[in-house]
Image (cartoon, helix red, strand yellow):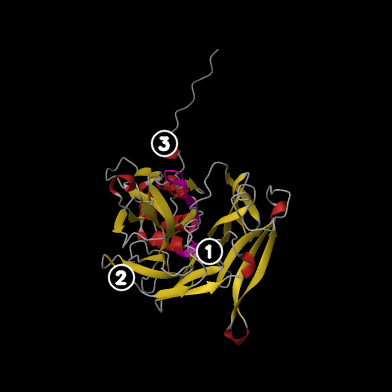
Amino acid sequence: MFPPPPARRDPAMDPPPPPALMDELVEEILIRVPPDDPATLVRAALVCKRWCRLIAGASFRRRFRELHPRPPMLGFLYQRLDGTDFVPASSFRPPHAVRDGWCVLDALHGRVLVLDAAELYETMEMSLIVWDPVTDDQQSLPIPQLPPFSWNAALLCVTAGCDHLDCRGGPFPVLQATTVVTDNLGESRACAHIYSSEQGAWSERITVVQHHNGCNGIARRVHGALVGNAICFNYEMSTKILEYDLGRQELSTTDLPSAFHGWQIVLMEADDGVLGFAIVKGSKLCLWAREAGVDRNVGWAQRKVIELDKLLPVPDYNRSAPLDVYTIATAPFVVAVADGIDVIFLWTDDGLFSIHLKSSRVEKIGEFISDLGIVPYMSFCTPALDMVSTADEGPRVDASSTSQT
């Protein structure tokens, strides 16, 4: 005997659906998504149109940036043999990361400065490009002159009252520092030009600093360091640092400790906002900072030492000589610093590693990544959402499309 059929359920007897979360509660939840995970915001925007509108709104983006005081490191760019590539450190993936013929120089506030040498062999011409990896916007600017010896360049920010959270659309000066060899043996001079995106032109040569430290050029192996109101560059195989003061518009040189002549160092901003540098000696990562001495003399002090043999696979020897062509393949050395988030990149025989200075957390990034031209890319990034106006469709979101904030 078959059981009787189940009684029909009256839809009117069903409990009402739970009320939708108020926009204020949704926003309070979503602004706490880690800033290095923009893909989660994309998935949240796919839930419904209301969430999509909320995430795409200017108010949400601003609160998101205010809650997270430092932009996250979304990845880093590095120099390949024939161009530039991007290695992600988050869910962010730029749509056009691989660039043949490009040489990455610097990154600041979501923009990247590159040297475009794609046409060098055909036209003997090069140019600088300010590139937004998120939107792929590019602005080309000519190089003021072909530097006769060596040079480097850096991005700056001069937006009045800028909190550096949303200055992507503001003006971007570019500083080019050049070393020129004079006729006198062992003497060279440094000069600087500033490019103004508002005027679309380079300035005249700002100042010249004479120095007699041999014909050492400005290093392009590592990027410059923005410390306070100054931008600083290394010299190759030298104990000199070239420093440009943005406020006074003056160039000067600073001496490093003489014991580090010829060593691979990377300039950085120390904890208290002064100029510092990182260097590897044997199996130790040493952090130094500039300090005021007696009679207003400037000195250097070692502030922190990290034992690398407890964190990384380090060769079993203590190197007491500077880097040269014979030891560079086996000695660990610093290749880049992500200022503001206390991350240092180290190159070893086993590959490229990142070290978080505060937690001593170590991550292996890869084995087949060049140690040349490594530039961290730090920026806020939220989804760029294209709303669909029909009532029966949800938001249409291009998951690869993002909006830099």
Q: Specify the quadrant that holds the C terminus.
A: bottom left
Mark 3, mark 2: which one is toward the viewer?
2
Which sits in the foreground, 325 or 97? 325
Asked if disc 1 and disc 3 are in contact, CB closer than 8 Å, the reply is: no
Q: Measured along the vertical axis of the image, is residue 270 above or below residue 132?
A: below
Q: Is residue 276 above or below residue 352?
A: below
Q: Is residue 239 visible?
A: yes
- Amino acid of disc 1: Gly
**Residue at the spot of label 2:** 203
Q: In the figure, is residue 405 to the left or right of 256?
A: left
Mark 1 element type: loop
| Mark closer to the chain start, 3 or 2 | 3
Instruction: State how far apart marks 1 and 3 are (Cα).
Output: 58 Å
Q: Where does the image place residue 251, in percent across and percent down from the top left?
A: 43, 74
- The crowding category of the residue bearing disc 2, from other C-alpha atoms within 10 Å (few below 14, some 14 to 19, many at least 20), is some
Along the viewing direction, whichever of 260 and 371 lies nearer the viewer: 260
Mark 1 vs mark 3: which is more N-terminal? 3
The residue sitting at 60% across, 64% down in the picture is: 261
Residues in magenta, as a range? 66-86
CB-based contact (under 8 Å), mark 1 and mark 2: no
Q: Earlier in the sequence, mark 1 or mark 2?
A: 2
Q: Disc 1 or disc 2, which is closer to the eye?
A: 2
The disc at residue 11 is 3
Q: Quadrant of the N terminus?
A: top right
Instruction: Give how far across and how far down residue 84 sits, in percent.
Output: 43, 47
